[in-house]
Amino acid sequence: MQIPFSELPSHARVWIYQSDRVFTQEELAKIKVASQGFLTQWTAHGSELKAGVDFRYDRFIILGLNESIQSASGCSIDASVRFIQSIEKEFSVILMDKMNVTYRNKEHIRYIPLKDFRKMAKKKLIPSSVIVFNNLVLDKGEYETQWEIPAALSWHSRYF
């Protein structure tokens, strides 16, 4: 069952997928419709999942699930991964590669391989105050408070 992302509780589990590029408005509109269709039929062991989706900066897809009502199962998580993979294929984007870093330098958002981020940090080409997107947050509460943080306060700090 799809609900507005804003109605999910702070303990709702989240999965964050970052795109290697910005989606066009046309692509985003299609992805939103597809997401609604997916969440409407998303189940675990035959039970509806109370879930929502958020889109940020025209490049992040955030799935949220209220697991206090029904937890995700292995099969339902596999279904969500297949859904994200279908978006990757249809729109020729990378969403599943976790070996990349997305960060914001002023108003520009950059997506680069982790190894390049590490090199830039070591050479002091980017400051430890740069805002990184911490896609390892576990729930909506962390997403709202710890997703966009200075690199020095995230797991990225080890590179500075």
Image (cartoon, grey):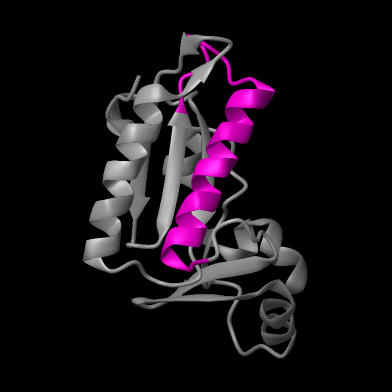
Say whether residue 149 is magenta.
no
Say whether residue 68 is magenta.
yes
Q: Is residue 120 above or below residue 136?
A: below
Q: Is residue 102 above or below residue 2?
A: below
Could you tell me residue 131's position as x and y percent?
49, 67
Task: Pick whichever, 50 or 142, lies toward us.
Answer: 50
Drawn side of residue 74 relative to residue 4, left or right:
right
What residue appears at the point 62 percent right and 57 percent down from the top-left corner? 153
State whether residue 36 appears in this view: yes
Task: Pick whichever, 121 or 22, lies toward us.
Answer: 22
What residue appears at the point 56 percent right and 33 percent down from the top-left corner? 79
Q: Is residue 84 above or below residue 121?
A: above
Drawn side of residue 158 relative to residue 104, left or right:
right
| Total numbered badges shown on the rendered structure | 0
Could you tell me residue 42's position as x and y percent?
45, 24
Most common SS among magenta residues: helix
Q: Quarter of the image holding residue 138?
A: top right
Task: Pick whichever, 119 or 3, lies toward us.
Answer: 3
What residue appears at the point 47 percent right and 42 percent down from the top-left corner? 143
Could you tell me residue 159's position as x and y percent?
75, 72
Q: Quarter of the image holding residue 48?
A: top left
In which quadrant will I find the C terminus? Answer: bottom right
State whether residue 9 appears in this view: no
Where are the magenta residues, as a range? 65-93
Could you tell me residue 132's position as x and y percent?
53, 64
